[in-house]
Amino acid sequence: MAALPDDLIDTYLSDQWRICGGPQSRQVREELRDRLIPITLRAFGSVDASLDILLKESPFSNGSGIPELLRAYELYWLKRNREAVEAGDRGREQICSSFQSQFHQLYCFECEKLGVSTSDRGDLHAILRTDYCRLPTPVIEYAPTNPFRGDGDAQRSRPGPKALVDAGRRKAKKRSYEKFAAHIGIGKDTLYAITNETRWLSDETYILMAEACGCKPEDLHPRDIPRPERRRG
């Protein structure tokens, strides 16, 4: 007896997210899963983190999920690649270009397999499992009255450093991060450390950036990296 669509495997399932849909053939779906998950882990660190980012930033996001998931992944890295080109960051450009190419190949593979049968279930898509997770609200501009100032979930829900920097960059009418960094008077590596939340910087740097972005210095601190202890003289 042929398996019903509901009996087919999910590509990915967690407390927060479900990735489903795609070609009806179980073998093809398993192949797509086995190719997608490792690429996503290399590109984002975790599948849930990647979907959280797309939910907030992708034009494919509908607020409760991401239709056309593979296309959304590809366009996300295309955007990052263009930003790297504008900033003159050749190393990051190569990384972004590589991930864009890998997701593009997966997207083409899916399109090829979906074209085989009209009974296929449609594009691979991600669904936010709201029984487990509060739907995040994208925040574009910084608002002084934003209530999210605490730790934990509240801190994660406030605008992140990248969103604040992007808002400041648009306000300054600077198209690239490199030009925005030069406008402020800092290096592009310093700016990327803030937007990517990779390390702590000096208090003076955060004060300078906060003035340019119209926010508080502490709003630009890394959210997931403990602050190093100050050296005692």
Image (spheres, rainbow, N blue to C red):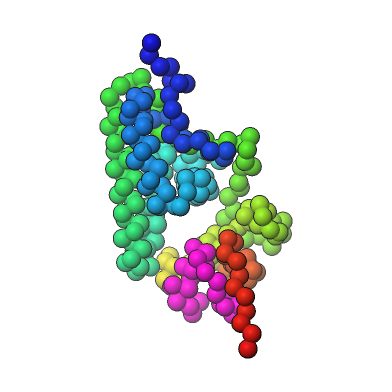
Q: Residue at x 36, y 63 (%)?
A: 92
**Residue placed at 38% from the left, 68% from the top?**
87
Q: Nearer the viewer, residue 67 or 50?
A: 50
- Relative to 160, 124 lies left or right: left
Residue 36 drawn above or below residue 196: above
Q: Left or right: 112 with respect to 56?
A: left
Residue situated in front as seen by the camera: 79 or 130: 130
Q: Residue at x 60, y 66 (%)?
A: 226
In the displayed structure, would residue 138 be above or below residue 131?
below
Which quadrant holds residue 1?
top left
Left or right: 143 with respect to 212? right
Can I make out residue 185 in this image? yes
* Vertical comparison of 73 with 131: above or below: below
Quadrant (top left, top right, bottom left, bottom right) of the C terminus:
bottom right
Q: Which residues are magenta?
A: 184-207
Return the x and y of residue 26 as percentages of the image width and height. Answer: 36, 25
Q: Splitting the image into 4 quarters, where does residue 177 fall?
A: bottom left
Q: Which residue of the protein is positioned furthest toward the bottom in this rendering? A: 233
Q: Between 186 and 24, which is closer to the camera in this rendering?
A: 24
Q: Nearer the viewer, residue 36 or 137?
A: 36
Position of residue 100 measured from the top left corner of the image (x, y, whole percent): 33, 50
**Image coords of residue 216 (percent x, y):** 65, 69
Q: Relative to 220, say whether 183 is above or below.
A: below
* Residue 202 highlighted magenta (yes or no): yes
Hey, which residue is sitting farthest top in the picture?
Answer: 1
Residue 108 percent coordinates (x, y):
29, 38
Question: How many numbered marks are there?
Answer: 0
Regarding residue 169, the answer to whether it shows in the image is: no
Image point 30% across, 49% down: which residue?
101
